[in-house]
Image (cartoon, rainbow, N blue to C red):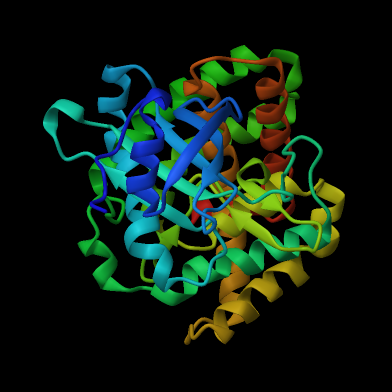
Amino acid sequence: MTAPAPVALPSGLTTSWLSAALGREVSDVTATAVGTGQMGACYRLELSGDPGLPPTVLAKLPTADAATRSFLHGSYGIEVAFYRLLLPGLEVRAPAAYYAAISEDPEQRGTFTLLLEDLAPAEQGDQIAGCTPAQAAAAVENIAGLHAPRWSDPTLLDVDGLTLPSEEDSATLDAILPGAVDAVVARLGDLLDDGDVEVLRTVTPYAGAWSLARLDRFGLVHGDYRLDNLMFHPDGRVWAVDWQTLSLGLPIRDVAFNLSTGLTPDLRRRHERDLVGSYHRRLVALGVEGYPVDECWDDYCFAMLQGPLIAVLGCAYSSTPTERGDRMFAAMIARSAQAIRDLDTVARLTAL
């Protein structure tokens, strides 16, 4: 069958469309909404038909609003590119894609569809509750499988939508971050303590320069590698989902973000040296050379700005504030601020 064009709405997920997309006859489909995504929609599809069909798949679609779809075209496109072009050559565990496409019709800008492996009984992590050291170890070893295979690979720049941070990007970050911090401090109020607010205001002036630093070792960066974007299986396996924030940068930013926001400060202090060591050993096993473990550790401490940066921007620009969302962002800020204090990140920033 000829692969069909992507659809924007769940009404487009007909049996005939799915048959063409999956290459197998689908006689019946039942769609159930999953999650509360801000940038799109996700549905679990129960399928009947050809004996070779998966019993369920997850369908990921854009937001229903056409103007917002068009605005988010770049984010949608990079996720499609991840599944179509990048994932087959990587060692990171992510759901398999049965179909991945984005429209190239200017009238359908931002229309994309992903049909992904249903990972049940794996369960989503809980950013507020945090994770165990064993879960953190699985997460950092998994993300090494994103970083190592294309470590400092210049051909990544040939992928549409992937660029190294630029001076213009740096200036934009410096321009928007102070206002975002002010908005988040006002919104979260008593959920943040004075010491954490002080850390936010201390690191903010360095964000632009930080984004450009240490790019002699660059790679693919998930960008939002937190517990809510990880699926944990009872047998210990972990998968990363939500690849719309994929970019290029200092790879260990993903590790710093995951450990600083996902572990309680006490657990992080006790286990982070070993966890960074596990990540480094996985990099080496996958072929990374010339990156000593001491340099990896220093990069980890330097990369701690990722935590407050993503939490602040996510909170400031989330379209629909919720009680859980506010508690989640506050927990992420508090934990990452403590990591910045513990690891003397500010001293590394002031040396820029």
Position in image of residue 142 (x %, y %): 61, 66
Position in image of residue 280 (x %, y %): 62, 76
Position in image of residue 40 (x %, y %): 44, 28
Q: Could one spot residue 114 in this view of the protein?
A: yes
Instruction: Please name the residue shown 45% across and 20% down the image.
Output: 179
Query: Most extreme residue toward the left, as rendered?
Result: 106
Tell me the quadrant of the picture where the N terminus can be found: bottom left
In front of the other: 318 or 39: 39
In front of the other: 331 or 27: 27
Image side of residue 48 versus residue 76, left or right: right
Tell me the quadrant of the picture where the C terminus can be found: bottom left
Instruction: Please name the residue shown 55% across and 48% down the image.
Output: 241
Image side of residue 135 versus residue 109, left or right: right
Compared with 149, 6 (above or below) is: above
Compared with 303, 4 (above or below) is: above
Compared with 210, 66 (above or below) is: above
Image side of residue 47 versus residue 250, left or right: right
Q: Could one spot residue 352 in this view of the protein?
A: no
Position in image of residue 204 (x %, y %): 50, 35
Image side of residue 202 versus residue 159, left or right: right
